[in-house]
Image (cartoon, rainbow, N blue to C red):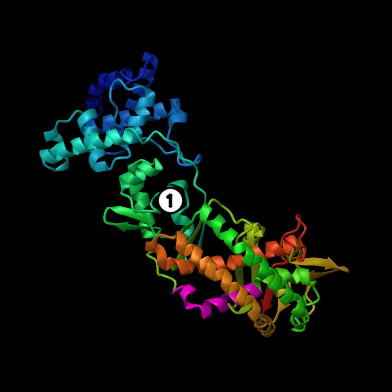
């Protein structure tokens, strides 16, 4: 096989010389190509040496062109530079810029056209040889050549454009890992392109700037994750995308209701603070402005659930089962990558003893950008806090200095008169049950207006094929009302603000067994 390689030395050099202006560069590139081929022969058995040699030659030349003119290389977000090593076609007489356009256009074609064009124009196989290679008729080869050329004419007018980074914040309403199906710019670009209408793989390539050879595997993975649905030979996004423009209009239309809800929530807290505190939980003597960090989201969640129960049209159906074994809906917001001030949620951390028995549950009602990922991870291993906290007095008493230091760092405890006490309220199960029972029908009435408006907005901008997912998205978005109300109350100076240098824990409570 090595002897057979000798006959390619001169052709490979001529290949490089015809494309590069410098003989020295041509010699360097031809040596690089031949070395790469020799290494390949050591590692694997090559059945078609001729095809392998010219594939490597075109790959290496493509890499050199990309390195020399990086600004012309296709990007899909700055951090996702596509590797252009492949059996790339190239015609004599093209300069580097023209080559880039031809390369992009060719790789926007599906393989059934691309491979035949490469074989005919680059490898110089005739139509009979190509027909034998792919086990198709000569007429089919001629038809694909004609169609491929026509497609290339269109592509050359469309591929020379730039692509910006796509921002998407991805969550779910259920139990699966949605981020793995929208983890990079390629997946996000595909989802955005296929949202309004289904597209073929070639149309996706044109819309995103991603060569078709990079798309097959990604598309299959996204279909498996129910991020895409395949309809015939086309793909369509299988979740609702809350576009930035729709989100802004939605928030603007809801703002008047938010002000009314905030006023009603605060009246409820002020008028019932003694009832809340008479439950007898640890932390009942905290200020109303501090307790509001848990009272506001709890009151709103209770009222939100009440509205859903009384209005079946906006109640989501059972969470759909997914191919990967999970269930639920994608929740995707365009224009943001992290949690901003308009997001709200509740994280729940359950703790067990060494025998597997429940010892307590920590609830964290986070609002927008105050969510701390590092804190969230640390709280998963906060069972030590439960073990050493006094249910009645709130005193933390541990002989383990590392546990004490960790609890201080996480702002779960603070030092008062040489002792350490919990920063967060502590409830028994019965106390917490009584706490949740103190709801307000007045809040629910105002929330009904807010949620029906929310549902109407979603229905207006959601594609009809995704109509069944609206209730699931509204279900989750409705909890964001806590973020809007908290922001409004903070503007009014009614909620106690945490020091910027302190870990935010006023939004937590502990229910201890």
Q: Residue 81 or 291: which is nearer the viewer?
A: 291
Report if residue 476 lies within the magenta region.
Answer: no
Q: Is 8 left, or right, of 376 in this rendering?
A: left
Question: x, y percentage for residue 338?
Answer: 58, 54
**Residue stretch in magenta:** 299-317
The image shows residue 363 at horizontal and vertical percentages of: 64, 71
Outermost residue to the right: 417
Q: Residue at x 47, y 52 (%)?
A: 183
Q: Secondary structure at mark 1?
A: helix
Residue drawn 34% across the image and 33% down it: 157
Query: Is 312 part of what is drawn in magenta?
Result: yes
Label 1: how many Cα within 10 Å (few below 14, some 14–19, many 20+):
many
The quadrant where residue 132 appears:
top left
Q: Is residue 84 left or right of residue 507?
A: left
Q: Residue at x 63, y 64 (%)?
A: 256
Please, is residue 384 above or below residue 90 in the view?
below
Q: In the rendered image, which residue does mark 1 sit on?
A: 192
In this rendered view, identify the residue nearer to me: 186 or 246: 246
As rendered, which of 333 and 106 lies closer to the eye?
333
Tally of numbered tags: 1
Q: Position of residue 390 (x, y in %)?
A: 76, 77
Query: Residue 15 at what x, y percent from top left?
Result: 29, 21
Question: Mainly helix, strand or loop, the magenta region?
Answer: helix
Nearest the viewer among 362 and 457 is 457
């Amino acid at each position: 096989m090595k002897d057979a390689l000798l006959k390619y030395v001169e052709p490979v050099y001529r290949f490089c010389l015809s494309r590069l202006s410098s003989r020295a560069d041509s010699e360097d590139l031809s040596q690089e190509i031949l070395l790469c081929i020799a290494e390949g022969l050591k590692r694997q058995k090559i059945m078609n040496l001729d095809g392998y040699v010219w594939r490597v030659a075109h790959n290496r030349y493509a890499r050199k062109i990309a390195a020399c003119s990086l600004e012309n290389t296709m990007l899909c977000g700055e951090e996702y530079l596509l590797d252009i090593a492949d059996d790339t076609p190239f015609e004599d007489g093209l300069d580097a810029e023209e080559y880039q356009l031809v390369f992009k256009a060719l790789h926007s074609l599906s393989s059934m056209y691309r491979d035949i064009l490469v074989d005919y124009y680059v490898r110089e196989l005739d139509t009979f040889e190509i027909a034998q290679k792919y086990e198709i008729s000569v007429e089919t080869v001629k038809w694909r050549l004609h169609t491929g050329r026509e497609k290339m004419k269109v592509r050359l007018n469309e591929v020379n454009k730039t692509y910006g980074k796509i921002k998407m914040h991805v969550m779910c309403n259920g139990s699966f890992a949605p981020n793995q199906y929208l983890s990079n710019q390629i997946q996000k670009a595909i989802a955005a392109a296929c949202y309004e209408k289904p597209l073929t793989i070639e149309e996706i390539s044109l819309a995103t700037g991603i060569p078709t050879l990079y798309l097959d595997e990604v598309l299959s993975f996204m279909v498996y994750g129910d991020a895409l649905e395949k309809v015939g030979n086309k793909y369509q996004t299988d979740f609702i995308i809350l576009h930035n423009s729709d989100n802004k209009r939605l928030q603007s239309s809801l703002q008047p209701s938010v002000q009314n809800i905030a006023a009603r929530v605060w009246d409820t807290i002020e008028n019932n603070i003694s009832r809340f505190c008479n439950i007898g939980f640890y932390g009942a003597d905290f200020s109303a402005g501090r307790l509001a960090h848990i009272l506001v989201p709890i009151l709103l969640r209770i009222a939100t659930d009440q509205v859903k129960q009384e209005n079946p049209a906006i109640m989501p159906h059972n969470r759909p089962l997914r191919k990967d074994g999970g269930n639920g809906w994608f929740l995707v917001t365009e224009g943001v990558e992290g949690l901003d001030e308009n997001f709200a949620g509740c994280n729940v951390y359950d703790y067990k003893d060494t025998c597997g028995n429940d010892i307590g549950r920590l609830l964290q009602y986070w609002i927008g950008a105050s969510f701390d990922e590092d804190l969230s991870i640390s709280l998963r291993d906060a069972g030590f806090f439960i073990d050493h906290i006094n249910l009645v007095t709130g005193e933390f008493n541990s002989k383990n200095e590392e546990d004490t230091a960790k609890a201080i760092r996480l702002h779960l405890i603070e030092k008062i008169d040489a002792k350490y006490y919990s920063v967060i309220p502590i409830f028994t199960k019965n106390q917490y049950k009584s706490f949740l029972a103190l709801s307000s029908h007045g809040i629910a009435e105002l929330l009904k207006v807010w949620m029906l408006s929310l549902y109407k907005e979603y229905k207006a901008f959601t594609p009809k094929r995704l109509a069944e997912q609206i209730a699931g998205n509204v279900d989750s978005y409705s909890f964001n009302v806590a973020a809007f109300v908290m922001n409004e109350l903070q503007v009014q100076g009614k909620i106690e603000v945490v020091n910027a240098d302190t870990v935010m824990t006023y939004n937590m409570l502990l229910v201890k067994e």
